[in-house]
Amino acid sequence: MPLKKHHFKGVDVLRALNGATFIWLRLDPRRGPAHDIHRAFCRIYWQTSDFIDRTRIVAGLFFLLPALLITAGVYTWRCGQRVYRQTGIRAWRQFLGQIDAGLRFAVPPPWYYMFEFYFPTHRMRASEYLYFFELKRAVYHELRRRWSQQTTLDALSDKALFSRHCARHGLAVVPVVAVAEKGYVTMENGGDTLPNHDLFFKPRKGAGGRDASCWYYAGAGFFQSADAKQLTATQLLDNLRALSRESDFIVRPLVTNHPALSELNAGALSTVRVMTCRTESGAVVCTHALLRMASTKGSPVDNFHKGGLAAAIELDNGVLGEATDIGWSAGSAWHTHHPVSGAAIVGFRLPLWEETLALARQAHDAFDDQILVGWDIAILADRPALVEGNKGPDLDIIQRVYREPVGNGQIGRSLAYYLSCPNYA
């Protein structure tokens, strides 16, 4: 059955121009789970694509080398001097490295810099990384088609349904107090007014922190935005109704982190991303975790793709490593201290760490038909609380901050296993 069609998006351009659907067919499946997943992506794509998709991919072969040369030139111009200052590797060598990685492993130039393939020890493992364009609308789609129930998928896609599902299973979750859709606002408690405390508006579906906003209760029935705009409760409701005519929104109480995190969050809510997956035996394990932090004062979100920082967390003890951004800019760096507060990041031990991991495992049990989930968890003053679950988690951020691929680790083994084994459910 063909995949549901979408508008021609960036991921389609990436697939059409990087040649992965041909280059990866020659990978040796005996080299480990990562190669199995890459070859499975090729199979899934060719089986589920229609004539237009296949024509697009074949036509893309004629533009593969020109596109690679142009993109490599752009990213060498953007990042080359920064990498040279940090490593001594000259820009022309970086340019040729991008061409080599693109033709041998189908690695687009941005990922050459994200995963630091200018280091030979990293580049030699390029085929062990799992890439955005093979996971989204391909590998993840196939896993969901074979293993997931629609009610569970709906709860992971819709933040209001997610909050209700978690509450039914007794999980600590940041609640939804109102849902706005098509010009109407519905209060979860059945009332007709917004509560008199700080609030957070966010699109009901989607990710990335897009269109999120904070409203602080100023007293006497007034709310104030981060840019000092003041509205009465009635005006704020009208504003919410107007927003929902374009896209559905949810309203949550604006929660704050545990006091110990105050110097790392730059005033925004920092969340922990915990990856859980179901092993070949059916057990649920935590494989990776990272702390996301806003990198500028006044940002309403900590999102990595919106300029935020992320630091890997040692699962055994909750201790942070260096923090970094996505790696695509001239100013990208690895930080031992937070750029706003100057507080030490490296060596910082997160509070309530065992409770946070336990909550992630319990959450996966409540969504037990999922193979891999990325949980966003806020560590509050008294407990960790779920913010959302990601059924198609971004592995770029994990592989970037851990500086190693996941394709031959537990995540890769689980994905390869459940892609290959029959579903007896």
Image (cartoon, rainbow, N blue to C red):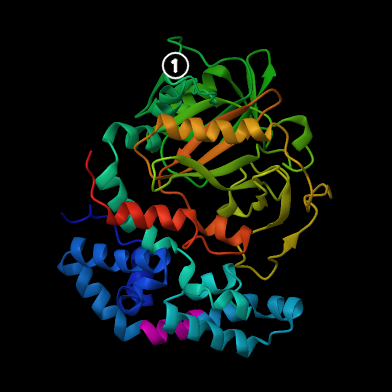
The N terminus sits in image quarter: bottom left
Query: Where residue 395 sits: x, y (%)?
Result: 50, 56
Q: Is residue 292 left or right of residue 25?
A: right
Residue under the image location 46 percent in, 75 percent down: 107
Residue 286 visible to the viewer:
yes
Farthest residue in the top direction?
191
Identify the magenta region.
64-71
Residue under the image location 46 percent in, 29 percent down: 250
Query: Where residue 346 sits: x, y (%)?
Result: 78, 52
Residue under the image location 37 percent in, 41 percent down: 370
Residue 13 visible to the viewer:
no
Question: Does the magenta portion include 394?
Answer: no
Circle 1: residue type: Met
Query: Where residue 14 sits: x, y (%)?
Result: 38, 69
Residue position for label 1:
187
Q: Is residue 333 left or right of residue 417?
A: right
